[in-house]
Amino acid sequence: MKVTLKTAQLQEVIDIVGRFVSKHSTLPILENIYIKGNIDTILLRATDMEKYIEVQMPASIDTEGAITVNARTFGDIMKTIDDEQVQIHVDSVKDLMTIKTSSDDFKIKGISASEYVAVPEVQSDKSITFDAAAFSKGVGKVEYAVTEKNFSPVLTGILMRLKATEKAHKLVFVGTDSFRLAEYKIDFHGDAGGNMDVIIPKTNIGDVKKVVDYFISKGGEQIAMKFSDNLLSCSANLDDMQIVMTSLLIQGSFPEYENENIMPTDFQTKVVIDKNQIEKAIRKISIITRDINNYISLEVSPDTLFINSGETDRGEANSTLSAVVEWPDATMGLNGKYVTDFVKAIEGSDISVNIVNGEKPVIFMDKDDANYRYVIRPLVK
């Protein structure tokens, strides 16, 4: 294979494709990027066997061919190249790639392309098309509430759910680790061939989001998803590039969280407070409590929110904040880090804290965004 490519574009593509390469595999081939030149396009593929990506873009192909090379080595070399264009030669017999510029000549030993993994095909006609920015935003609003390891596999992924009603379509993103839960709803204005209910592993969806963000930065708007019981593929097309990402799905039933025991709707106390004030106060308290589950105690009084650490082996800390309070008189313990995670994710300036009592989950909301709900289970010190 002999191909000429724009250096900047190739550098960007290697960066996003490299995210899908296996980081700790015992199989060297999974640490490689698959590269194939065919007529007037070049295809790059990578996988860790849990997620897959293919990027196809136009190129000047003199000779067709294919090879796989180590993703890190290939990427590190490309970062050193300043020329506007780069030539790549592939000797498929010797499995050797040569990268040439006006002043440099690199040779990378590869592995035969015939040994690379094929991308699984989604055997389903279920699909939706929607705004790429909506996907990126939805994932960003809930991914922090999910851990990569949990006793229940369904709690290691993000739920994407599309419910069609007579009045509206809502695309819902949900993440939970069983101690907290984040839900973000987006008005859906795309094309849907029915309802959607899939759980995408957190280990995969973060990299998918990075690629979608890249797609958006290049002017991309719409993405198409096709899904079955165990696979999801995401297609994003630019004028000079086609990107397809495929992810295994977590099979199982996501917890039914919309009930009063998990997500209450009938509150006894409501507090509205400036997000920067509460974040700053919790940072102060955490100096004392960071070794004991970041414990903080909230006490609500008229026009005031008291945050304290209680008495600990390190000492004690208290902070008093002005707040707008309805039906005061409530006290509870929470994980302070969980609260600050939510603060960082909201766009508004004020947080609404909705409390039933000291034993029921607390609902945090962005005061300016009714589509965003965040649940934290109280702690007992």
Image (cartoon, rainbow, N blue to C red):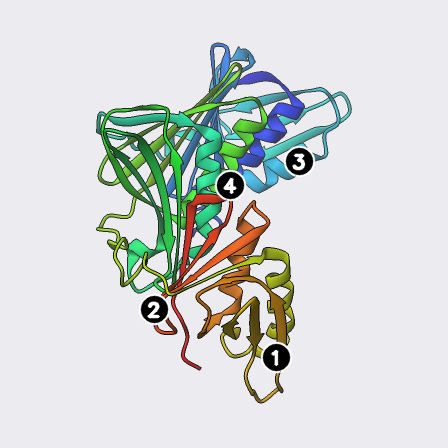
Marks 1 and 2 sit apart, C-alpha to C-alpha, by 25 Å
Residue on which disc 1 sits: 288
The Cα–Cα distance between marks 3 and 2, rounded to whole angstroms, is 55 Å
Identified at 61% across, 62% down, the residue is 279
Write down the residue under mark 2. Answer: 360
Nearer mark to the viewer, of 4 and 3: 4
Identify the mark at residue 252; answer none if there is no mark.
Answer: none
Measured as percent of width and height from the top left, residue 135 is found at 44, 35
Q: Earlier in the sequence, mark 3 or mark 2?
A: 3
Which residue is at the far right? 103
The circle on residue 77 is 3
Name the residue beneath numbered marker 4: 19
Q: Residue at x 66, y 23 (%)?
A: 7
Kind of residue at badge 2: Lys
**Disc 2, SS:** loop
Local packing at callout 2 (Cα closer than 10 Å; few below 14, some 14-19, many 20+) is: some
Label 4 or label 3, whichever comes before in sequence order: 4
The residues bearing labels 1 and 3 have C-alpha atoms spaced at a distance of: 47 Å
Residue 83 image point, x, y percent: 74, 22
1 or 3: mark nearer the eye: 1
Residue 151 seen by the camera: yes
Left or right placement of residue 369 versus residue 126 in this view: right
Query: Mark 4: few, some, or many residues within 10 Å (few <14, many ≥20)?
Result: many
